[in-house]
Image (tube, helix red, strand yellow):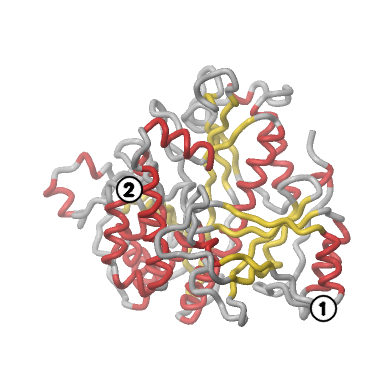
Amino acid sequence: MASESSKVAYTIPRVPAENTGTKPPGSDLVLQWLKEYQPKWLRVYWVDYASSSKCRLIPISQVYQALENGKQITLSITKACLGLLQVDHLIPGVTATGVYDLHPVWSSLRLGPAPGHVSCYGEFREVNGLDSDLCPRTLLRRTLEKATAHGLSFLVGFEIELVAMQKNPDGPEKYRPIQNDGHCWSTSRVLADWGREGSITTALGEMVDELNAAGIAIQQLHAESAPGQYEVVLPPFEPLKACDTLLHARQIIESTAARHGFRITLHPKPWAHACGTASHAHISVSSGDDNTATPSHIYESFYAGVLKHLRAISAFTYSSPASYERAVDGYWAGGRWVAWGNQNRETPLRKIEGSHWELKTFDGMANPYLAVAAILGAGTKGVIDKTPLAFRDCEVDPSGLTELQRKELGITEMLPQSLEEALEVLGADKDLTNILHPEAVKRYIDTKNAEIAFLAPMSPEERRAWILERY
């Protein structure tokens, strides 16, 4: 049964786009919205450099008291929060000294992910009020400000691929695949028990209700190829809202599934015998009037910039050692070659129509703020530099071409084949480093290298189980 929150219409408070925690000018509207829905808790989220979703809970009475008295709502968080591994180990060079102020971004406020809870995302600032150069959400906001200065705007829409698992208390592994006879891509028979208590499809139905209650009207839901694997297609939004929406949708999906006794994972390759799991990003580029089609020379330069830096960008979009278990040819996963193709699912970039392209080499282990900042920053640089799209349209799987055939299409480079290689490429890409922020790129590389070192002593099965527990 759907929770009480799913029975009411959702209206996002019309606060200024990035108002963060201060009374003027948006707090009265936030108060009005909160008192209409009467939650018990406010969750304030952030996502760190290990792509772990973190949050703090504030009793709603404390929120009311602060906003009614014109006080800022901030949370004092140790600076170590952006230098931790998934097991709370500090990475080398990071200490427990110093604090940030975490400011709620009220425009991201939504119902859920649990009954009686509302959530928003936050940005870190220094105690003197200045932006933190290491805050992932701030990094994306700054990237968008630069793009806006050059007349560019974007829409981003994500696909959530997820795998639902059953708990396995009596077996050697914590989780086991859901046993669905004949489960495969878009098959209808896996929906046959929708409505039966204990069915994953019944849980999926409640997930959709909860997403709707939170103002997230999904565009499609269908079965994917692996056991228990489904895809939820989210609507497109401007990039910050798209990332906030992606993260909140995942929280709702995970929370609803857990209430039905299922475990959701975003592991890129949870089952060795089955297809992997991604989080494809759809991007549309606009320049000037939104009612006018973007000129081809603009969006082609944008995607030329993305392709130019794609090997380095992959360090953000394929951010786990497990990501590279999925990065293979012939599985509709975007393949291993730096290329693009018109409606070609075996190239990293798939052109759909006009400026609407899809990046397929992106999975659920990525921090979306960092990954989208890297993509849009590289593309914006391509527009500024008027980079020509030297790659030709690849109409087939590039792995099946000869070297000469690939060369004729401009396909000469492969994507990194491991996270270690991707981090080396990112460290050597000075343009992308400067497009983002040198300190942020260094912190990311240091975090991921520490993660690699932590996982290195594990066997493949131990590493798989460890990731399943956390993502």
Residue 347: numbered disc:
2
Q: CA distance from mark 2 to mark 1?
A: 52 Å
Where residue 202 appears, as percent x and y from the top left, is 70, 29
Image vertical order of residue 393 relative to residue 440, above or below: above
Image vertical order of residue 460 relative to residue 54, above or below: above
Identify the residue shown where x is 69% and y is 38%: 256
Q: Describe residue 435's horizontal placement relative to residue 167 as left or right.
A: left
Q: Nearer the viewer, residue 343 or 448?
A: 448
Identify the residue shown where x is 70% and y is 23%: 198
Identify the residue shown where x is 37% and y is 39%: 326
Q: Nearer the viewer, residue 303 or 457?
A: 457
Which label sits in the foreground, 2 or 1? Answer: 1
Asked whether the viewer can see residue 71, the reply is yes
Where residue 190 appears, as percent x and y from the top left, is 58, 24
SS assignment at label 1: loop
Instruction: Kindly identify the amino acid type of the residue bearing the numbered disc 1.
Output: Gly
Q: Nearer the viewer, residue 349 or 226?
A: 226
Residue 70: numbered disc:
1
Where residue 468 appears, as percent x and y from the top left, is 50, 36
Identify the residue shown where x is 35% and y is 45%: 334
Q: Kindly give the residue lying farthest to the left in the view shown.
A: 404
Q: Nearer the viewer, residue 127 or 397?
A: 127
Where residue 82 appears, as percent x and y from the top left, is 51, 62
Circle 1 crowding by C-alpha within 10 Å: few under 14, some 14–19, many from 20: some
Instruction: Kindly identify the amino acid type of the residue bearing the numbered disc 2.
Output: Thr
